Amino acid sequence: MFRSFWENLTIKQKLAITAWLFLAIPIIFYITIRFYPTYEAFYVSFMKWNLLGAKKYIGFKNYIRIWGDEDFWIVLWNTIKYAIIGVPISLLISFTVAYYLNEIRFGHQTIRALYFIPFLTTAVAMAWVWRWFYQPMPIGYFNIMLSWIGIPQQPFLRSVEQALYSVMAPAVWAGLGFQIVIFIAGLRAIPKSHFEAAEIDGAGRLQILREIILPALKPTTIFLIIISTIGFLRIFDQVYTMSEDSAGGPLNATKPLVLMIYDFAFDEFKLGRASALTVILFLLLLFVSILQLWLARNRYAKK
Amino acid sequence: MQKNEIFLEKFDNINPRRILTWTLIFIGGVIMVTPIIFMISTSLKTGQEVYFFSLIPDKITFKNYIFVITESKFGYWMLNSLWVATFSTLSVLFFDSLVGYTLAKFEFKGREIVFIAILSTLMIPTEMLIIPWYMMSREFGWIDTYWGIAFPGLMTGFGTFLMRQFFMSLPDELIEAARIDGWSEFAIWWKIAMPLVIPALSALAIFHFLGNWTAFLWPLIITNDPEMYTIPVGLASFNGEYEMNWEIVMTASCLATIPTLFVFIILQKYIIKGIMLAGLKG
């Protein structure tokens, strides 16, 4: 029965059936593990729910509560600060290193490895190392080094002003290697003829940088800006590990959105409000992604 | 002598500017690994010596390592991380490339929709799914199980997209020829197409394994039993317990980091190439 059915099919039909067979398990996976949970996150964001009791529809109340929550605005501003300060600093450093590292032949691989290794580390492990560096005298190496040059002790993680930057530093540090490798790939992809033409025209180093390298690296730069912006907006591991007393402290000074979501959901069991926060995070990331498409539109239009 | 000659030949246009550049970039590189070096050095120090700033311990001791391995559940965490990351990576290699291949090399109605649907999952942040995933896991009893830790990452939109790009660049004639020879579709994919995209597969494997090895948020939520923790969750649990014993914390951090560094040293060429590949295609 099956055999004769199969043999009566055209090749095209057979291939289509094979394709759907190959896709069957993945489609089930994507529906149950990706799409249905996405729907559920939106759904629960309109509910009042504490995990144990029944869900109760409360309309936009979760969102209204969040809007009226002073802490939310602090947390949102922290999250944005991680991104708008962390991204330019890391891209500036990684581009500078990539630009000069690309010219180096002697020991190129070894030096590149030095820059790249932090990217392979576990964020939680390195957060511990940095947290140790930030300790007061006589433990913390940063304060010890500051004392050598006569600068007074700094509180770092214990200060409302400095904590956010102290947490940001290891995140920047760990991301540089990836950005440098991508920038070098971008630099290598620029056709040699462009440089030769510029040299014949008598262009100086700075002029080549400005008129050839930077424009050619635009797609690479946009890609890195978006990837690292999204990374900083989702920062969590470092903050969670480096907080001295309560996670996100002192006084919420380092708390990002993801940590607030975690606290609401798994500490206070306000799952409705936590879901509403995840929707807000989603919209924030969506905005950044759309920005990328808009910035890169010329690239796609040309192709 | 000979080495020097080659060195000089390479650098016939050596000049102060180049030497300065090299020196600065080299120093920058050394600064980059300093935290890792100090982590290793402190893990080899005794408790009292931690309070002295020094790179090389006066007396190298492995006591901290013995302490971490025997007194904490680090052995469990290591095995859990290894098992989950391996299982998840194998699943991703199999399914992402199967889906990528199907979307690249089969023509059928609905292909575009499936592709766009899978691609669109890249827009959904994990953080939005963790609450539904957690609810699901409670329902089905997946909390504190390997399956519970691993299930969200068994297939990825990124890997599917990457593999599709690579399979698209394979010539159709190859597949046609195998079809005429009577190969099954599965065999064509597994025995002909897969070996041709090994560079992409290894890049994907390295990315996914590393991502799993360092993953924190989801394992933190899905595990309560310390024997089920992965390495990052176990490390975070040192908060409060060994907080003031920095040499112990550094030792555990070393144990978490050193395996990946070894893998990197062995596979450096492939890893860098893989990153460049994925970065340019993505």
Image (cartoon, rainbow, N blue to C red):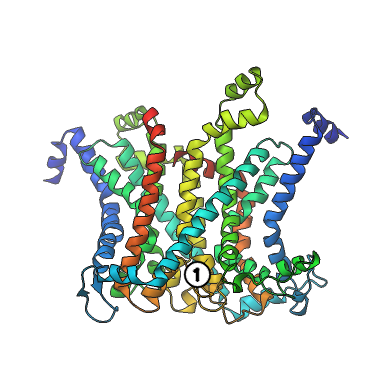
Q: Position of residue A131 (x, y in %)?
A: 62, 70
Q: Is residue B242 left or right of residue B25?
A: left
Position above or below: B115 against A140: above
- As rendered, which of B69 and A193 lies closer to the eye? A193
Left or right: B11 as drawn, with respect to A97: right
Is disc 1 surrounded by few (<14), some (14 to 19) or many (20+) residues within 10 Å?
A: many
Q: Is residue A258 visible?
A: no
Snapshot quadrant of residue B103: top left
Q: Which residue is mark 1?
A: B230
- Residue A111 is at least partly visible in this image: yes
SS for callout 1: loop
The location of residue B259, given as percent across then percent down, is 61, 60
* Residue in front for this viewpoint, A218 or B174: A218
Q: Is residue A10 above or below residue A276?
A: above
Which of the 4 quarters of the picture holds residue A214?
Answer: top right
Instruction: Determine the residue positioned at 60% across, 72% down.
Output: A159
> Is B143 or B187 nearer to us in this picture?
B143
Q: Kindly identify the amino acid type of the residue bearing the numbered disc 1.
A: Thr
